[in-house]
Amino acid sequence: MKFNKFAIVLSGVALLSLTACQKDQDDVFAESSSVRLEAYMEKVRSLLQDSSNGWLMSYVPGSTEATCYFGLVFTDQTVTAYSQSDPANGVTSPYKFTEDNSAMLSFDSYNSVLHYYATADSDHYQARGGDFEFVIMNVTDERITLKGRRSHNLCYLDKLSEAPSTYLQKMNDAESALAIVAFEGVVKGGLVEGFLDASSHTISIGRKGAESAEMVSARYMVVAGGIHLNSPITFNGVSFSDFVYDDAAGTFTGSGIVFKKIIPEGFVSYKDFLGKYTFTWNSGSRNFQVELVELDKDKTFKLKGFSTYFEPVIGYNGAMGYLTWNTQAIGVNGSNTVMLCAWDSEAGYLTWNTDVGLEGRAVDNTVAAFTISWKSNGAWEDYTNDSWLIWQLDANGSSAGAYQDWTTATGNYQVPGPFTMVKIVE
């Protein structure tokens, strides 16, 4: 009987607790979700304004873009944005918080700094993959984590301890001092090499002679005296998160391991690729003149002269010092997207996979005979992409056939390879 009585009393306590809990829940959720969301956004607004020096905004606008950094100073209704390219001059515009199933920070009024990566232009008609609307993911006093509404890439706002213009200028100075693209050394008895790609702010490290796919990689941020990795990487049991660069000694040190600065074989600087070339095609039997001109400094070029209808974008691998030319969108035809597609002219197959393309390496980098040889980048395993042709995709991303209204300097929508480019010495 005593046992039964104890059981009854315990059940009563549980029932009372459940009733009390239900009442607490009713009190907590007395306000509607929209009211709670509005209060939350006002709390974030106050946090943004309370930082007198503002916030450092960092995010990757597109898969191939480098991490971009902006300095942001908020008032109740406006934000003043500072860029690395012009840290001394801020651009002010309104901002707002919106609701779309979650709290969002929106910079929907045009701001030349904040909209740089999200605005299309004649050279980037699909823009650069950037966002101007961000979902608020997490909030602390020192960091606010956002997610781009279009790109779904994470973005961070970190509280600044000094003026944005001062901080960004220090970043620029540090980047200029980081005169290194490759390094080598020993990790736990094994020979190791690594590369820094300034065009995407990516570091890669692996065993000496390894293919790029075998190496571990991470995005990095340039800081005074070296770099800081956005996420640590581990190779051969050693974790790396920061590297210190000593230009005078030619060393690059991470996790206590001293690496030696090297110049990769065949490396060519971005500026040395600029200029006019004789572009040979159809295995060298025909040619026309082109010019590599600056698009985004140290990142991309335009290939002028390839066509009167469009100018292909040529990438630059800043770690290895060679060119990349991938399948790419070049315009629109009604609802169709016009593509410059990699093509295996011998097998007769093409692809609109933008990972597939060519690598352009200097086979002779003397001034008198600077020659670039274009070869497949190996991303199309079953075929040899050594040629180009103009094709269309419909609104669903399916093949819509050749687009022969646009031609290249060959006089045709097809450009059979292989290709070389010989620099014209003027």
Image (cartoon, rainbow, N blue to C red):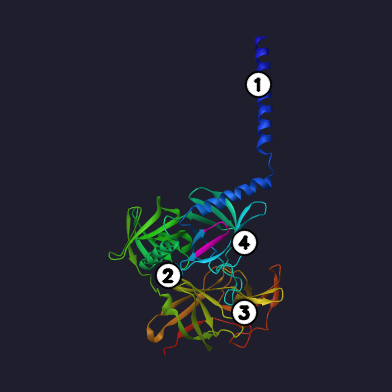
Q: Is residue 254 left or right of residue 394?
A: left
> Which comes before the other along the chain, label 1 or label 4?
1
- Binning the other alpha carbons within 10 Å of mark 3 as few (below 14), some (14 to 19) or many (20 upward) gives many
Residue 78: in sight, yes or no? yes
Q: Which residues are magenta?
A: 74-81
Give the label on residue 13, or none. 1
Residue type, numbered disc 2: Met
- Binning the other alpha carbons within 10 Å of mark 1 as few (below 14), some (14 to 19) or many (20 upward) gives few
Percent across and percent down for residue 366 are: 37, 82
Please tell me whether mark 2 or mark 1 is closer to you in this view: 1
Give yes or no for residue 75 being in the magenta stretch: yes
The residue to which callout 2 is attached is 320
How far, Cα to Cα, is label 2 from label 1?
A: 71 Å
Residue type, numbered disc 4: Arg
Residue type, numbered disc 3: Leu
How far, Cα to Cα, is label 3 from label 4?
A: 30 Å
Residue closer to the observer: 139 or 254: 139
State the residue at coordinates (64%, 45%). 36
Residue closer to the observer: 216 or 329: 329
Residue closer to the observer: 344 or 102: 102
Q: Taking 25 as reference, is 399 above or below it? A: below
Give the label on residue 150, or none. 4
How far, Cα to Cα, is label 2 from label 3?
A: 28 Å
Q: Are marks 3 and 1 in contact (CB under 8 Å)?
A: no
How far, Cα to Cα, is label 1 from label 4?
A: 51 Å
Q: Taking 95 as reference, is 328 above or below it? A: below
Q: Secondary structure at mark 4?
A: loop
